């Protein structure tokens, strides 16, 4: 349950940040999770919902934004969606020369209450 410890880390981090801003609660947070980041968005979200009980995030809306990786094939110039890090080009079978997105795991925004 690697998602559980990550969720605990995120809560600690945002509570610290909110504390520095003298907030009483966090009303909303948005977290981006890339599909090839090694973190599963659904278990992460469930872990977050469980662990936020009794924290400053208890009433917060949790927005998990899933980001899909895209591969760029230099060989045939196609651009395709990737589900796994080792996905190859669906047109010609080559490995993408460039991967855009998919590795995200970050808190992109949070709304705090005074
Ligand atoms: Zn290709």
Image: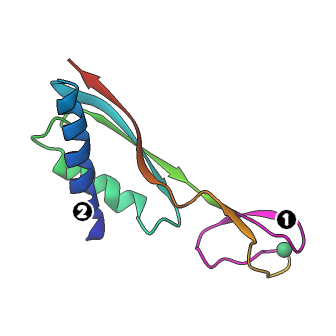
x and y percent of residue 109 in the render?
40, 35
Q: Is mark 1 within 8 Å of ligand 1?
A: yes
- Give yes or no for residue 89 being in the magenta stretch: yes
**Mark 2 and 1 residues: CB-CB less than 8 Å, in contact?**
no
Q: Is mark 2 within 8 Å of ligand 1?
A: no
Q: Residue at x 33, y 53 (%)?
A: 45
The residue beneath circle 2 is 4
Query: Residue visible at 53% across and 67% down?
Result: 36
Q: CA distance from mark 2 to mark 1?
A: 37 Å
- Residue designated by label 1: 78
Where disc 2 sits, the SS reads helix
Most frequent secondary structure within the magenta stretch: loop
Q: Does label 2 or label 1 sit earlier along the sequence?
A: 2
Looking at the rendered image, the quarter that the N terminus falls into is bottom left
Question: Residue 95 location in percent, x, y?
Answer: 74, 79
Q: How many marks?
A: 2
Question: What is the residue that sits farthest to the top in this orientation?
Answer: 114
55 w.r.t. 103: above or below: above
Neighbours of disc 1 within 10 Å: few (<14), some (14-19), many (20+): some
Question: What residue span does the magenta drawing correspond to?
Answer: 70-90
Q: Is 19 part of what is drawn in magenta? A: no
Residue 65 lies, with reference to residue 82, above or below; the image says above
Where does residue 87 sit, x and y in percent of width and height? 66, 77
Residue farthest to the front?
20
């Amino acid at each position: 349950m690697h998602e559980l410890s990550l969720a605990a880390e995120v809560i600690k981090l945002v509570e610290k940040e909110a504390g520095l801003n003298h907030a009483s609660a966090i009303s909303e947070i948005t977290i981006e999770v890339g599909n090839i980041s090694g973190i599963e968005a659904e278990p992460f979200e469930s872990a977050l919902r469980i662990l936020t009980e009794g924290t400053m995030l208890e009433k917060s809306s949790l927005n998990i934004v899933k980001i899909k990786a895209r591969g760029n094939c230099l060989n045939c110039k196609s651009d395709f969606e990737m589900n796994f890090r080792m996905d190859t080009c669906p047109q010609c079978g080559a490995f993408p020369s460039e991967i855009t997105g998919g590795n995200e795991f970050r808190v992109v925004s949070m709304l705090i209450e005074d």
